[in-house]
Amino acid sequence: MRHTSYPLVIILLLIVTSAFQVSAKPANTRQITVEPFNAIDVSFDIYIDYTISAQNSKATLTAPAATFDSVTIKVVNKVLTVSHKYKPYKTGKRTLRIALYAPEVKSITASKSGKVKVRNNIDNASTLTLETSTSGEIITKDIACTKLIATATTSGEIETGNIDAGTGSILLTTSKSGEIELKNLNCNNAALNTSTSSEVEIDQITCKKLSATSQTASTLSIEDIKAGNIAATASTSAEIKLSGKTQNAALQASLSSTIKGKDLVAEIATLNASTSATATVTATKQVSLKQARSGKAVYYGNPSKIINNTK
């Protein structure tokens, strides 16, 4: 005859039920109307899902029950800020989420694993600033503005769609493992700077003047270039990859760095390579070469004029 221990079964059921309740703590939501603002600053694993809307600003906060009452959403000096007593970023999960509906802003900052995702296109008549640091993240769709300033540092990331600055300028800066990834860029002047193991990737760019600097083991990759003038400088084991067309290209590599410009076709090109660095380009009319201290300046194509300045 088989005996069943009912008390033991009941105890096990209670343990399983209790464990389930602990692991499935419900999240609370709260709708908040906020004052007008023109900038967003998010940090500490907070995720803002931002939809641009002409209506009054409003936000819906979703947070675990244990931290819900500690969260404060307010506007200080026209900057939307979110603060709380606890620091959920220690868990590695974005436990605080905000669905935000508000007019366009001029600045977005994300730090300490905070994230902002913009759901629709940005059409800004002035300067737009995007800044990430300490694993912060910003994701946008297409952007139209007169000037874009984007900075990613300390493992921060920025990802956008097409950017149209018209006759304005674009300034991109990465450092300390920061990353910026963009699709198509259109502007008058573009300045791109990478350093300290950081990275910039651009799928296409159209501009009159392009300046690119990469140093300290960083990578800068620019494809499908249509530019009047290009000045690129790589140093200290950095790498620059260039492809497309330009009228004038001035490429300088030093200290074991590399400029890969075989797929960049320039009418007039100047190459300067020193201290075990390499610089390459394809020239159609004229090329000037200078090499020093085991540097290699290499050209492709059949330019009608070759100037060798190496002594």
Image (spheres, grey):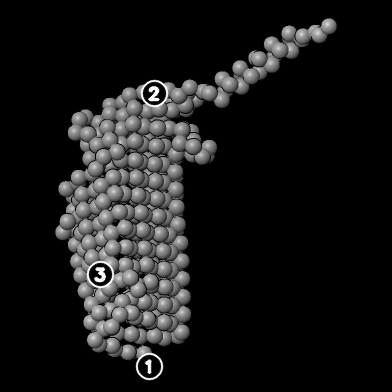
Looking at the rendered structure, the secondary structure element under dot 1 is loop
**Looking at the image, is mark 2 or mark 1 earlier in the sequence?**
2
From this view, report whether residue 286 is shown above or below residue 134. below
Q: Residue drawn at (40%, 55%), measured in percent from left and top?
A: 179
**Looking at the image, is mark 3 or mark 2 earlier in the sequence?**
2
Q: Residue drawn at (66%, 15%), measured in percent from left and top?
A: 13
Name the spot of residue 73 as percent of width and height, x first. Answer: 35, 31
Query: Mark 2 against mark 1, which lies toward the viewer?
Result: 1
Looking at the rendered structure, the secondary structure element under dot 2 is strand
Looking at the rendered structure, the secondary structure element under dot 3 is strand
List the residue tagged with mark 1.
311
Query: Mark 3 against mark 2, which lies toward the viewer?
Result: 3
List the residue tagged with mark 3.
245
Q: Residue drawn at (21%, 63%), measured in percent from left and top?
A: 207
Name the spot of residue 209 as percent of width and height, x first. Answer: 22, 67
Q: Which quadrant of the view contains residue 49?
A: top left
Task: Give the amino acid type for the residue marked by disc 1 in the picture.
Answer: Lys
In screen coordinates, is 267 left or right of 203?
left
From this view, report whether residue 300 is shown above or below residue 114. below
Q: Which mark is residue 29?
A: 2
Q: CA distance from mark 1 to mark 3?
A: 30 Å
Q: Which quadrant of the view contains residue 53?
A: top left
